[in-house]
Image (spheres, rainbow, N blue to C red):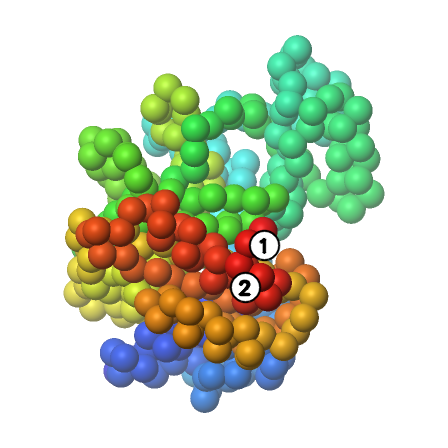
Amino acid sequence: MPIVGMVGGGQLARMTAQAAIGIGATFRVLAESPSESASLVTHDVSVGSHLSADDVSAFAALCDVVTFDHEHVPNAVLTSLESAGVLVRPGSAALRYTQDKLAMRERLVALGAPVPRFGTVASVADVLAFAGESFPVVLKAVSGGYDGKGVWVCASPEDAAAVIAGAAEREIALMAEEYVPFRRELAALIARSPSGQGAAYPVVQTVQVEGICREVIAPAPGLHPVVAEEAQELALSIASALGVIGLLAVELFETRSGALLVNELAMRPHNSGHWTMDGSRTSQFEQHLRAVLDLPLGSPSLLNVPGFTVMANILGGDDPDVYDRYIHVMAADPAIKVHFYGKEVRPGRKIGHVNLAGTPEDSVDSLRDRARRAASYLRWGTEDGE
């Protein structure tokens, strides 16, 4: 088997390492430290910085194909690897559209994909010209944001002025977007191989709290089949147009009129796909490996048709000792699957997730309640917490 190298040692690399074992792939990780999430479970670990061309190049020399668990490797480093003949999947040309939100929006418009109205801004006057009398308005860092960081919902010109001042101090370029009063958020996760084969997972509903994904429901309850197919086809067409190899997650707004708008793109395993570890015939992590190795893609279908699978993220609480609470959750609901990331517990930090694959007889509400209670107990020691 070729050697797959993943730049980044976070939980996505950790769970990809698990999938690599199953398909017999040799898997290497470039991590910032020996204590990172993936370093703790991966045999072949190189310690270095994803920002260093020398570190990334030395790591790539040990691999047959290089992929990523985040989007923060500088584009110049990626193009240098490609010039040296390294197989980079997805490539620099595709990853640019996850690193630069303005370029992403402009490219999607050129492709005819639906997006919120947007524009560049550098001053309060620019924001006022963009928003007119319509507040709130959303300001975003053009690059570097994730998990709600780098996104500000401004209710007034004064809010916008504070964001612009802070961005100027840190030399952060900003763009503005219209505030979309959406009905809910959806995600369409697909995979694409170098041979052009594509596979689309069921469209899911995601629940965000303060910019962090807290819950995923697969498939999205009550989503019309025509709209679901539209979302899958949109994601597949974007992947093809951008030349994506591997996974592509397209985060979507479902507006109150029922229309879809593209919010964000991610070209890697994604939080919206963690449910696939226990609810799909092929996990997103195995699928990503299959895609970057140009193996035939696996079935993305649900295991429990016509049932639902719910994922709930576990955030750190005040007590770092989760072992006793873990035992309680396993005993209280044996159907719950707990996935920990090996991270130090800090308040609000993602330290794991729970999956619950229901039967056709289980209601969505009951599955969500059970998953939330498990995640709450692991965080707070009570089943009725946040």
> Residue sitting at 29 percent across and 59 percent down?
357
> Few, some or many C-alpha atoms within 10 Å of disc 1 (few <14, some 14-19, many ≥20)?
few
Q: In what quadrant of the picture does the N terminus appear? A: bottom left
Label 1 SS:
loop
Real-space Cα separation, disc 1 to disc 2, in angstroms: 7 Å
Foreground: 44 or 58?
A: 44
> Residue sitting at 30 percent across and 68 percent down?
286
Tell me, yes or no, if residue 272 can be seen here.
Answer: no
Residue 317's place in the image compared with 243, above or below, is below
Label 2 SS:
helix
Which labelled disc corresponds to residue 281?
A: none
> Few, some or many C-alpha atoms within 10 Å of disc 2 (few <14, some 14-19, many ≥20)?
many
> Residue sitting at 35 percent across and 71 percent down?
334
Contact check, label 1 and label 2, Cβ < 8 Å: yes
Residue assigned mark 2: 377
Q: Amino acid at mark 2?
A: Tyr
Which labelled disc corresponds to residue 385?
A: 1
Q: Could you tell which of marks 1 and 2 lies nearer the N-terminus? A: 2
**Left or right of 145: which side holds 282?**
left
Quadrant of residue 274 within the rendered picture: bottom left
Residue 30: % across, % down: 52, 76
Q: Amino acid at mark 1?
A: Gly
Quadrant of residue 109 within the rendered picture: top left
Foreground: 252 or 30?
A: 252
Foreground: 86 or 240?
A: 240
Residue 218's place in the image compared with 84, above or below, is above
